Image: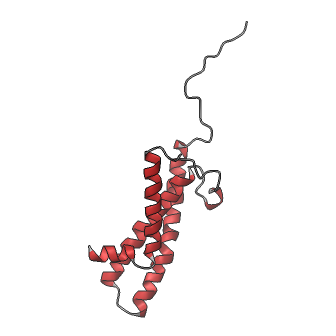
Amino acid sequence: MRIFVEAAAGLPMILCTAALLVAVCFWLLLAVGLVALDSFDADADLDASGMGGVPVAVAVTLLTVLAWVLGVGATALLAVLAPPGAIGCGLRLVVAVGAPLIAWRLTRRCVRRLSRHFPDERGPSRPTAHHDAA
C-alpha cells in the first residue's frame, strides 16, 4: 500500500492525482446539481483532438482517470522492479510521457463508442402532436 501511495503522491504522478481530485469534485458538484454536465462545452472544442462527440467533462474525466490508472500502476511496478539510479529515473520519465499518450488513444476509442449516447441535438422532452390542416 505504501508503494501505491508513494506512486500516486510522488513526481510526476502528483499532477495526474491533482487532476483526478478536480474531476471527482466536479462530478460531486454535478451530483448535487450545482453544475451542469455541459458546463465546459462552450469553452473547449475537442473535435481536433479526436475526443469530440461527448461533453467535454466526460472526455477529460475519462482521459484523466485512464492516465492516472496507467501512470500510477506503472510507477508502482517500477518502484518494485526497476533498478535504482539513472535507469529507474529514465523509466519513470517514460511513464510520465507514455501514460497520458496511451490514455489519450484509449480515450479517443471510448469516446467514439460513447458519442452515440450523446446526440448533438436534443429531442423534445415530450412528444408533440401533429395536426394536419385539411
Q: Is residue 34 depicted above or below 78 in this figure?
A: above
> What percent of the width, then of the height, locates residue 119?
58, 41
> What percent of the width, then of the height, locates residue 63?
50, 61
**28, 71: nearer the viewer:** 28
> What percent of the width, then of the height, locates residue 33?
47, 43
Residue positioned 43% across, 93% down in the render: 86
Q: Is residue 73 left or right of residue 38?
A: left
> What percent of the width, then of the height, locates residue 129?
61, 17
Residue positioned 31% across, 73% down in the render: 4
**39, 80: nearer the viewer:** 39
Q: How many marks?
A: 0
**121, 42: nearer the viewer:** 42
On the image, which quarter does residue 81 sit in? Answer: bottom left
Residue positioned 62% across, 57% down in the render: 46
Quadrant of the frame with the C terminus = top right
Q: Is residue 1 left or right of residue 132?
A: left
**17, 84: nearer the viewer:** 17
Question: Could one spot residue 74 in this view of the protein?
Answer: no
On the image, which quarter does residue 2 sit in? Answer: bottom left
Q: How is the image coloured?
A: secondary structure
Quadrant of the frame with the N terminus = bottom left
Question: Could one spot residue 39 in this view of the protein?
Answer: yes
Q: Is residue 23 depicted above or below 117 in this figure?
A: below
Residue positioned 57% across, 47% down in the render: 38
Q: Which residue of the protein is positioned furthest toward the bottom in this rendering? A: 85
Q: Is residue 55 left or right of residue 31?
A: right
Q: Which residue of the protein is positioned furthest toward the top in this rendering? A: 134
Q: Which residue of the protein is positioned furthest toward the front in this rendering? A: 34
Q: Is residue 76 left or right of residue 129?
A: left
